[in-house]
Image: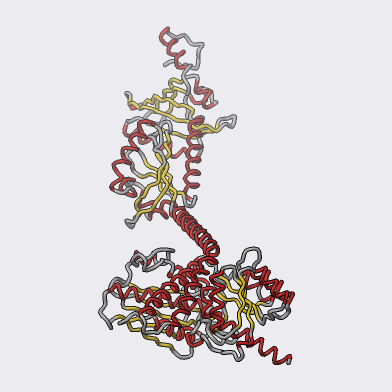
Amino acid sequence: MPKLDRPDEIQSPGESSCQKMVANMPGALLQYAVGPDGKFECRWRSPGCLELWEVHADAFENDACALWDTMEPKDIQLMRAALKTAANTVSDWTQEWRITTPSGKLKWLRGVGRPQIEAEGWMVWNTVVVDVSDSRRANESMRDSEARFRQLLSYVPNVSVQGYGIDMTTRYWNHASELLYGFTAEEAIGKNLLDLIIPPELREGVAKAVDVMIESGSPIPPADLSLLRKDGTTVDVFSSHAYLDIPGRDPEFYCIDFDLTERRESEAMRDLLQSQLRESQKMEALGTLAGGVAHDFNNIVAAIIGNVKLAMDDVPVDSPVYVCLTEIHKASRRARDLVQQILAFGRRQRLARNVIAMPPVVVDSVQLLRATLPAGLELRTQVGDNIPPVLADGSQISQVLLNLCTNAWHAIQAAGLAAGQGLVEVQLDAHHGKLPSSDHETWVRLIVRDNGHGMDEATQKRMFEPFFTTKAPGKGTGLGMSVVHGILRDHDAIMKIESAPGLGTTFTIYFPAAIGDSKPVVGNGVDSPASHGQGKVAAKKNIHILYVDDDEIITSLMERLLRREGYEVTGFADAFSALEAVRDDSMSFDLAITDYNMPGMSGLDFVRDARAQRPGLPVAITSGYISDDLRAQAPALGVTELIYKPNSVEELVAAVHRLAQEVIENAQKSG
């Protein structure tokens, strides 16, 4: 057998061609034989052996130790076992191992051999050995890179990654996927991805999309999807795909899912905030509008209410005209209340919270409610003992009670109950114990309960929306519950609602108790019918009143009203003329009442100039819109009474009585 690494030997032309071919092949070719007694003999080797092992052929011609000595000790046993198995079975052998050459190079070698048995028991091996160091390093680098990639993805939070093959079998499942979908990696890997997380109605479409991705090499376009969890629920995700075409391996696909739950919640919160902003803007616009129209509109309402009141005093109660006047009075008061509700809804009314006792507020409010109680309806009141005070605006609490009871009456009427069956219950008591979202432990509980038609869930969700109403056209404005909601919010109160169609409605309101605060204010801020006309003043005819309002109708009304009460009155529709009369002092005014919103001069300007001429002159201001600025500036200028104009008939007389009494008392002290 020729030794091809010895070119000086004579060879045939065929052998010469074979030698050239083998010399240009990478790696080494060699044939060696092992005898029955273990004798080694290298019969043929290519020049590549020297380049591969850096060992001359002479060194291993009859002894393979020179080659075995280059092998890494850890690989020797594996090599012996592989050769032994191939020899025993006379089957092909293949193996990879490491060597360190005499020059110190570390190489990975790959050998492929085929044994055959010759006469006398010799086993001959024909072997090809190549250097695979570069590919081995590349593979190791790829494995390291893949391991780092998988480790990285395993610990990336909120990014769910699933790897799968052409057959959709899951090969990779990171920790975020476990958290998102509920399947552990052990449960998911090896399962078809369609069966794991794809809803049945989407599986056909997803399978077709994967087929297109395989054929085109382009990933599936990202999209929002609702996928399945282990427990059968769905989760919204933003799903995108990655296509990996690795040479020598089947394509791999990765699905990257982002949980949209937080984004959906954020979007819902954003929508809610935008909705609240729009409502706030609407309320602000409505409040501005209400403040703008209140002056003129309230002048009209005040004129109607005042003149009707005067006319009712002049007409016998049994007269048909009295009935008509009563209806006009009801309608005008309804118009007045509507403006008040719009102002309250627009947050244009001042909140005057004081430490007050709730029982008088409820009792007095119920007394007022009884006067307008529909026929055949019963109103029950139960007030408990030892009820702590609250920090509240009594008039606004009365407004809450009025609105809730009015709604209760309408609900009873809508239920079609027979006369005597309708019932509204008002209950006030103390409540002890913490409530959700609050640290308060002591509360004052107000309950309004009716046996009307009740509300379904949809109505309860919308009941606080501005202008939402279930009443027939002309029967409600849709502002009542919005006003209630705003008042309770300003009072840090908590409301619970129990209602169902046919079962009536119960409103339970918890007001934080004002434990440890100052002593409750005497009175409740609610006008009582018995209070009007009290405090009659002696010698009224000696009191000269200056009344100023740019609306001649109001001026005429108030002149007649106050003269009927026994006062001397001089009215002016022009503020500048009234101011000249004060300067002249020929009329000797004892007190002045002026409108606030007048052309050319505000009520405050008039008061400032009038008191500059007449220091100490008692003054009251009437207005259809009593703003916070007006309340703040009026006392500093000496204004002692602010009167809401539509209530002029009721409130103005009482205010004039108080001012007149002050004038008389001051005169007595000075005399």
Q: Position of residue 330 (x, y in %)?
A: 41, 75
**Can see residue 386?**
yes
Above or below residue 228? Residue 507 is below
Q: Is residue 209 above or below residue 48?
A: below
Compared to residue 118, the image places residue 252 above or below, namely below
**Relative to the observer, which residue lies in front, 23 or 268?**
268
State left or right for residue 169 relative to residue 281.
Answer: left
Residue that appears at 56% across and 79% down: 652
The picture places residue 356, in percent across and down from the top left corner, at 54, 84
Residue positioned 28% across, 73% down in the render: 415
Across the whole image, how many numbered discs are drawn on residues?
0
Let me know if residue 510 appears in the view.
no
> Which residue corresponds to the image point at 44% horizontal and 89% vertical from the top-left?
384
Q: Position of residue 37 (x, y in %)?
A: 39, 31
Q: Residue furthest front?
A: 586
Viewport quadrant of the N terminus: top left
Image location (x, y in percent) of residue 36: 36, 30
